[in-house]
Amino acid sequence: MKNLFLALFLLLNITAFAQKPCEIDSNVTDSLGTYKSTKQQMIFERSFAGNTTNIFFALSNTNGLLAVEIQYIQKSNEFIKANCFDANTRIYLQLNNGKIVTLIYSGNDTCGTLLRDDKNVNNRIMGGTFLFAKDNYEELKTSPVTYMRVKFSGETVDFPFRTEFVSELDKVKYEPESFFINYIKCVEN
């Protein structure tokens, strides 16, 4: 009887701590090299007083260079102030173990695109690629992210990470704190 309980206990622990399967969006090898990326995952959602902010992350590996591809989407009935990415833009990830991982913006200056949809709602969409410094992502494999600070060209904005949430946008459950723990293994090699 003890062996049965021990076996059941071990099986439940293995299931509870199993990593998520890799969801690869692109995996290309050609004469220019290799590119691999995960599917986008929502890591932040805020909806308050008619204003909505959604942030999506995807991890990528281009010829051995690891990066985070970010999509930052804002919606509002009012005018949306532009936050821009430039050469000085950084993302700081505060980890549960107290360490901070810095990501460096690697693209051209951009303030995104402001669009008005058919319901007369303003939408600002901005994307960018942020690079890890050499081997500074090792802590992300084991420690959850609790906080993200984005230093835009004109201001700094903080985004707290939740352990999990069900998105109002697509009704899918996301786990932002463990995003890197679950998916960095998918693009490392």
Image: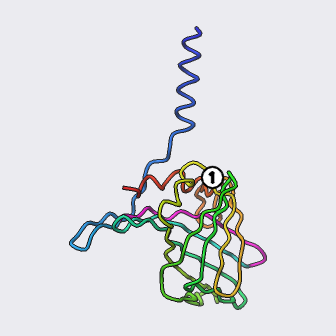
Instruction: Residue at 48% x, 83% y: name it.
Output: 107
- Of residues 5 and 143, which is closer to you in this image? 143
Residue 83, percent from left and from top = 65, 85
The C terminus: image quadrant:
bottom left
Q: Which quadrant of the view contains residue 188?
A: bottom left
Dominant SS type (magenta) = strand
Outermost residue to the left:
31
Give the left or right position of residue 135, taking residue 25 as reference: right
Residue type, label 1: Pro
Specify how the rendered protein is coloured: rainbow
Q: Is residue 1 above or below residue 80?
A: above
Q: Is residue 131 above or below residue 111?
A: above
Instruction: Residue at 69% x, 83% y: name it.
Output: 76
Outermost residue to the front:
134
Q: How many marks?
A: 1
Q: Which structural element holds mark 1?
A: loop
Outermost residue to the top:
1
The N terminus: image quadrant:
top right
Q: Is residue 95 above or below residue 69?
A: above
- Of residues 69 and 65, which is closer to you in this image? 65
The residue indicated by pointer 1 is: 144
Chain part drawn in magenta:
36-50
Residue 109 sits inside the magenta stretch: no
Q: Mark 1: few, some, or many residues within 10 Å (few <14, many ≥20)?
A: many
Residue 100, percent from left and from top = 64, 62
Residue 135, percent from left and from top = 48, 59
Residue 40 sits inside the magenta stretch: yes
Instruction: Residue at 57% x, 31% y: name it.
Output: 13
Residue 123, percent from left and from top = 61, 85
Give the left or right position of residue 98, taking residue 186 as reference: right
